[in-house]
Amino acid sequence: MKELDPLLHSQLRLAVMSILMNVDEADFVYLKEKTESTAGNLSVQLEKLNSAGYISVSKGFQGRKPRTVCQITDHGRQSFAQYVDALKTYLNL
């Protein structure tokens, strides 16, 4: 059986990746609301995904408010697809 990527096997990181697979980009507030996570936990998990090259994170301002925007990278898309394929082997799909 194929090994599941331990970075993607975390519930919150998997949720973030699943969301980012379906949108062009998502800001921190949107991800926090959709995943129902705390700001601190989400921040840590985004940093892990960013460090692995699965997502890109850009910080800027919208008006006077800080805004953090995340996008999935090509490497992230490929890793997510491999994770799903590996998961299918466990489910016999």
Image (tube, rainbow, N blue to C red):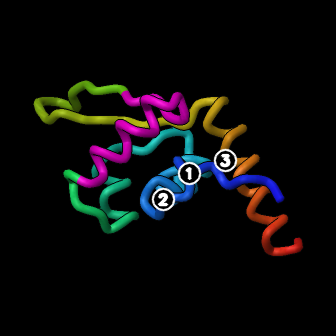
> Measured from the top left, where is residue 67 in percent x and y?
25, 35
Q: CA distance from mark 1 to mark 2?
A: 7 Å
> Measured from the top left, where is residue 3 in percent x and y?
72, 53
Region in magenta:
41-57
Q: Are marks 2 and 3 in contact (CB under 8 Å)?
A: no
Q: Secondary structure at mark 2?
A: loop
Q: Identify which amino acid the numbered label 2 is placed on.
A: Ser
> Measured from the top left, where is residue 22 in percent x and y?
61, 51
Q: Which mark is residue 80?
A: 3
Q: Is residue 12 left or right of residue 1?
A: left
The disc, 1 or 3, on the residue closer to the chain's N-terminal end is 1
Tell me what residue is drawn at x 35 percent, y 36 percent.
47
Tell me what residue is drawn at x 43 percent, y 32 percent.
50
Q: Which mark is residue 6?
A: 1
Give the quadrant of the C terminus: bottom right
Q: Is residue 48 magenta?
A: yes
